[in-house]
Image: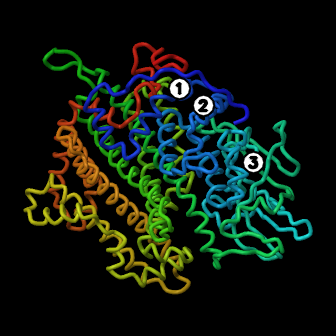
Amino acid sequence: MTTMSSGTPTTLPTWHSTPLGAALDRATGGSYHEVKRELIGRLPLDALVRDHGMTMEEAREWTRRSARVVVDAGMSATGFPVAQGGLDDPGRSCVDFEVTAMADLSLTVKGAVVFGLYGGAVNALGSERHREEFLPPLITGAHVGCYAMTEFGHGSDVASLETTITHDPETDELVVHSPTPSATKTYIGAAAEDATIAAVYGQLVVGGEGHGVHVVLVPLRDGTGSALPGVTIGDNGHKGGLLGVDNGTLTFDQVRVPRRMLLDRFGGVDADGRYVSDIDSDSKRFFTMLGTLVRGRICVATGSSAAARKALSIAVRYADRRRQFDRPDGSGEVLLLDYLAHQRKLLPAVATAYAHRTAINELVDRLQELHQLPEKDQVAQRELETRAAGLKALSTRFANDTIQVCREACGGAGYMTENGLTGLRADADVFATFEGDNTVLLQLVAKGLLTGYKEMWGDLDTRGMVAASARMVGDQVIEATSMRPLVDRLVAAAARRSPSETLLDRGWHLAMFSDRERHVLETLAARLRRAKGDAAFETFNAAQDHVLLAARTHMDRVVLEAFVSAVDACDDPETRDVLERLCTLYALSSIEAESGWFQSHNRMSATRAKAVTAQINRLCGELRPVALELVEGLGVPEAWLGSAMLVEDPARWTPGATG
């Protein structure tokens, strides 16, 4: 970025103090584990750990400088084509997002907006000439792009955006206009101060006929930083978090750009002024365009997962050194983490963090795998989009809840700004609503399960979904929730054992999750089948709680299966034993949280429910001695935690200090 300057590199020591911690990190770090280690080893500490007391202006300037460091480290290029100076590795770009999220979420989001969203739009929605012209200056930081989708009047409902992009045949230009105050683009990251160009979403009008939402590149500022004619730029100002990101507003008053600025991979205007597209349906074209940007939701999932792991790393380390109340035998005060109630606050959350990490690893690998296919598998792509939506919703909800629990677990110290949790809580908060509101995304997941991924090429309105559910048969449910061979084998083995033997049986856990998913989905389909004609919306609206439950139960099963597979792949006995306990803790904690459902649907007795709780308590006690190793295995370097309460010498983590 044009105003950024490089920071001074510092040395970061190895962050694993125990062999088991390193082994757990390696076992659950995914296929990009070594890439993460290499990045963490060479990124300068002063560009990653920010002073928590900075003002908004100071935080923006720090983020600007640190983003320059990220660019110089090559992290801006990884997801782009080799021809434009990139690595053509979308999976690696998600890992870059995760690594910076372990350090500072403002830095992460600033990079995500500029390179992931704006750059991703150019790369995925533009033609080769767009990539050749606009990606190289973006990768080097000469251009700063922003992603102008959200409007005051329309956020999640992208199809109803009011901004217009009208082709003028007399001049062969596109006229970008904000026809109403509610058409103002808002919350646009990098717009307030830094962006020089925007990817603007709007309704394309050619020859007086509308063709739905398209994207056009619109320059925003001249060489002096002043807004160009017709462009009005505002500043959203102080936010509840992410103070380092300059969110702003954009309005356009008959702004003219050349026709070539339209990103026309899926539809555009030819030299004769006619609209042309290989996709005949506006809705199909719309969802195809949005589907190409699935990486953004995967990145949000990786970032929120990293934020939760960072909070747990702080809270568990603090609880392992903070003492409270004397022991009855007079041997000294009790460590917080020796109390069962404290273990119950933190250790099941640690297990869930491991589970989410393995599921996100699989998602990143699948993104890269589909990207490398010589011919695109559209059904697999839709399945990826649905899973990305679900994991984004699941991981961001977990992050917000867990960071709050971690803050409370640290008492008054957790409320002090210098200890890092309040800032992390504020920064992660918005993850639940950007890149798709979680409620909307969970509805998308349920929609994919009900209609089958193949049908998602069609209209995705409520009426279409309800009608499709009426055609759904049992086989289609099986297709959408199919298991992998390992899971099939474990479930079959559990079915041959008596109930008294299965509390710790992985097959029983998997069967409970999949049986619940199947029941919820089938009963939802039965409810929606009763809808007729114009009653479709009312029926769907009345069943929304059921819809959201179907999505969550599906994603819970997906996460458990990913964790089970990761444990199965671990060949080190000591590491695997710990992972087995973590996996059991995750599964039983989830079953305990939903014990009301399992009991009311005759899947579990009250006696069994009590046994589950007792076993969770035992597992917490068994894992307590390796609590430090568990958080080391979460992969967040201690030097990046930025928490004053964890160090005797504050210089050990103060920005600018050598680690």
Which of disc 2 and disc 3 is earlier in sequence?
2
Q: Position of residue 375 (x, y in %)?
A: 50, 68
287 horizontally vs 198: left or right: left
Q: Quadrant of the C terminus?
A: top left
Q: Nearer the viewer, mark 3 or mark 2?
A: 2
Give residue 139's quadrant in the image: top right
Mark 1, secondary structure of its residue: loop
- Which is nearer the eye, 381 or 546? 381
Inspect the image, locate mark 2, and give the three-letter code of the amino acid beneath it.
Val
Mark 2, secondary structure of its residue: helix
Mark 3 vs mark 2, CA separation in Å: 21 Å
Q: Which mark is residue 44?
A: 1
Q: Which mark is residue 197?
A: 3
Give residue 337's quadrant in the image: top left
Q: Which mark is residue 69?
A: 2
Mark 1 touches mark 2? (CB < 8 Å): yes
- Which is nearer the eye, 199 or 9? 9
Mark 3 vs mark 1, CA separation in Å: 29 Å
Inspect the image, locate mark 1, and give the three-letter code of the amino acid beneath it.
Pro
**10 Å crowding of disc 2: few (<14), some (14-19), many (20+):** many
Q: Position of residue 498 (x, y in %)?
A: 7, 62
Q: Quadrant of the N terminus?
A: top right
Which of disc 1 and disc 3 is earlier in sequence?
1
Which residue: 73% across, 63% down?
202
